[in-house]
Image (cartoon, rainbow, N blue to C red):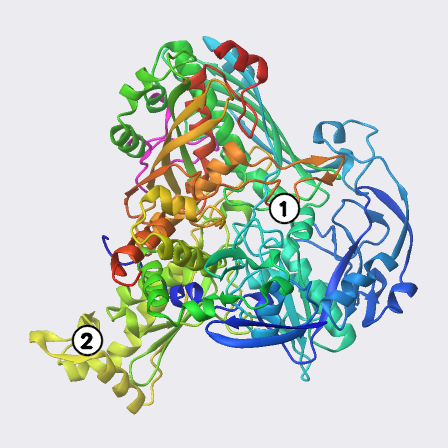
Amino acid sequence: MAKISFILNGEEVSVEADPLKRLLDVLREDFEALGVKEGCGEGECGACSVILDGKLVNSCMVPLGAAEGADIVTPEGLRETEKGKVIVESFADTGAVQCGFCTPGMMMAAEALLEKNNNPDESEIREALSGNLCRCTGYDLIVKGVKVSAERGKDLW
Amino acid sequence: MKRKAFRNDAYTKVTGKALYADDINFAGQLYCVPVYSGYAHAKIVDIVTAEAEQRPGVVRVITWKDVPGSVTYGQIFKDYYILAKDKIRFEGDVAALIVAETREQALNAVPYVSVTAEELPPVISPEEAVVDGSPLVHEGYKNNIICHHKVRTGDIDEGLAASDFVIEQEFETPFVEHAYLEPEGAVCVPKGDGILEVYGSIQHPFSTRRFVAAHLGLPEGKVEVFSHPTGGSFGGKDDTASMVAARAALAAVLTNQPVKMIYTREWSMMESYKRPAYKLWYTYGFMNDGRINAVRCRILADSGAYTSTTPWSTWRSTAQSCGPYVVPNVRTDVYGVTTNNVPAGAFRGFGSPQVNFSVEQIMDMAAERLDLNPVEIRKRNAVVNGSTTITGQVLDTHEVSTHEVLDAVVKETDFLNKLKKSSKGRSDGETLYGIGLALSYRGSSIGAEGKDFAACTINCQFGGSIILETGIYENGQGAESAMSLILADLLGVKLERIIYKAPSTSHIPDSGTTVASRGTLLGGGAIADGVKKLKEVISENIADKLNCLPREVVFKDDHLWGKNGKNVSWEEAVSIMYSKRVYPFAFGYFQAPSVTWDEENGQGDAYFTYVYSCQAAEVEVSKKTGKIKVLNVTAAHDIGKAVNPSMLEGQIFGGIVQGMGMAVTEDFKIEKGHVLSLNYNTYKIPKAGDTPELKAIIIENADPNSPTGAKGIGEPALEITAPAIANALYNATGYRCTTLPLKLPEDYLETLK
């Protein structure tokens, strides 16, 4: 057991836990960040995506210990921001959502992309989403959701 | 953007607020995990749990002996074991359950359950399984055959003899994994009043309720299965997911505490049922003018260890065994066969993708031989208005639009010119190019497989909001949104008034399963009936205020209208109803038109209507590596009526990409009954960068058999993508690939270099 401190959605937090515990489980169990989903447990599907120090990561592959001092954003944090709201609206309006299990992770991937590139073209969007699997949509409407986010939020990123 | 998509659950889902099975928790909740034996086929000698019971945190270890109700259950034949009893029939059979205070403690105790068993030789191919003397997977299925469906039309021998030429071809399609993003899971809560509450990642609550009630020996009314978001299903969250719910329920009842059971991806892929693997043998007799004169078809479907829905999916394969074509002489025999492979069950498309993969390639083979183009040969054979299907059904109750969908795709893609440009194995550059298409008709809903009816309640609240419940279940396809749109449209009220309340099994009558692309058709039909009844009761009470007769009241633009522009707003109307103490409430239901079936000869009106579809794909194939890149897919579907166009497009795109996965990237590996594809790293579903350009053409010939005119789209979208790509592959390379996933053999690749 160890005490690990990090910033979660803008707030300083700490947790007493096994440093080898998956960040995914810590976020879900200790911080009720239920928008972080487990789809595969081996870093293939992206449903557990969070942004750690500005980078999109699969939280199932991050041991808690590696989060010490990190700045972590989950869907719970992103959805409350102006940028997050633009992504949510855009995804909803374009029909990017079906079963929804991959969608919070897709939102995180969109945010990570737009932070780096606020005017991505289609292939850049597809590349940015390539770590996030979706079985329902065939991706087209998610890609469109990211495009619309970039258009609507061009002053935000 | 054309028009905003309507999706009642979009915000909760994007934001991560939507609660899925693993997000639901109860105080005092225990955790349950499965214990597998490691065998694919074995006789169980003993299951010893004593040591596991002593492990830290373990509350209880459960075996079949603890099951209070039936140890076996199933949708058709009750041969599926909740917990293995005398035998292990496949690798995913669960020998025991461990219930502990934490999931980690439960997992840690797994190695302490010991299963002693005598290994038996596994039956791994249906061809071996049906041979006399093959080991039996179950007692009671002679030669391991669980079902046999037939079509007998005309005289096959005479038909083949009279044909100008004959094409004989064998095809093979593999098990396909649904790969829904959320694995199976359930949380069950025993309540003080004897009701058992079930939450879970399931396809349809009523089916899950039947499994849970049967295994626990409870009346169905004592099991309440709740609706909540499910992370994808595609037909895949019935039997296995219901079993997971039943196991959690069993643990909850035995411990008298809430119990959660969430599957890992590996357990899911090892245990959950797949699309059945098929072997298909076709003999086609053609005339020189391109007409099909006779078809002999024999199919062995690998049902794996349990029956699940194989008798139904193989029935669909049977009824649609010759594609959307008129064939005067047919002899079809489709067998469902049990083996020690992973069980097979429902998967989007049901029994159609396998036969379409075969039939649509044979059509191209015949076209080439006759020097006809693929469009022309299809037009000469496709069913049209008034045609008789291979099962003797006359298609005269709806618009038969095979030519329309075909023409739409041909025009959109400039198919015939692109066909001429196809490489046929020769090109100057590094790649080969080809285009191909496929055509289908798909019987809507479940047809002669089963009883087909659905219900809804429309409950108008004081103040004007309207609570809608239906027995159609949201799996991600947008059912709730479509139902809400239908209600708003038919009742002439603002969409914002409608609150879709996902009902539990205790709130609405059993409306069957959300399968067979039947949700919009059946649920919409129920709403149409409910709206008719609701309008009657409201009109009777409002007409005097509108100076008209009840039958003259018009519901439009959020108002009720009488003569000469006299009107009341919807809120006022509801208020009047309440002041008169009459409920503005209706119960609606829809019974699908009846269908007929003569099992002995495979004759009858198999489905009450059909969806017509055509898809074309363009591919680029690397001469060096053989890698197949699907450039684009163009799809035309006559779905009757588009209820929610944006969502419809999403369904079509999603279906095509699943079909493309099946065609090109997905390769489910199972060896001697052991599943090797256990996660997304070895089972490759398409990623955002792999998908082709997609184009959907929506054709709306409103269906007179459907109260809303709508038919369905879930399955048509997937069922012809693979043959369109296979035909494109042939036109690119000159290689006819009859197995999936599509792959050029090394020696053929050599000839291209």
Q: Is residue B89 above or below residue B729?
A: below
Examine the rendering and report whether any part of residue B452 can be seen: yes
**What is the magenta range?**
B380-403
Return the chain for callout 2. Answer: B
| Residue A85, position as x, y percentages in the image | 34, 67
Answer with the quarter of the image where residue A78 lies: bottom left
Looking at the picture, tell me which residue is in the foreground, B131 or A126: A126
Of the residues tagged 2 and 1, which is closer to the observer? 1
Q: Residue at x 81, y 30 (%)?
A: B134
Label 2 and label 1: CA atoms lie apart by: 56 Å
Is residue B334 shown left or right of residue A76? right
Q: Residue at x 72, y 63 (%)?
A: B247
Answer with the quarter of the image where residue B82 lies: bottom right
Return the chain for callout 1. Answer: B
Looking at the picture, tell me which residue is in the foreground, B374 or B574: B374
Q: Amino acid at mark 1?
A: Asn
| Residue B22, position as x, y percentages in the image | 60, 66
Residue highlighted by disc 1: B679
Q: Amino acid at mark 2?
A: Leu
Element type at marker 1? Answer: loop
Q: In this view, which residue lies farthest toward the front? A: A69
Q: Crowding near pointer 2: few (<14 within 10 Å), some, many (20+)?
A: many
Q: Is residue B495 magenta?
A: no
Q: Is residue B201 above or below residue B150?
A: below
| Residue B125, position as x, y percentages in the image | 72, 31
* The label number, if any, that marks residue B560 in the structure image: 2
| Residue A28, position as x, y percentages in the image | 58, 69
Element type at marker 2? Answer: strand
Examine the rendering and report whether any part of residue B321 can be seen: no
Instruction: Please tell me how many numbered marks the rendered image carries.
Output: 2
The tag earlier along the polypeptide, 2 or 1, is 2
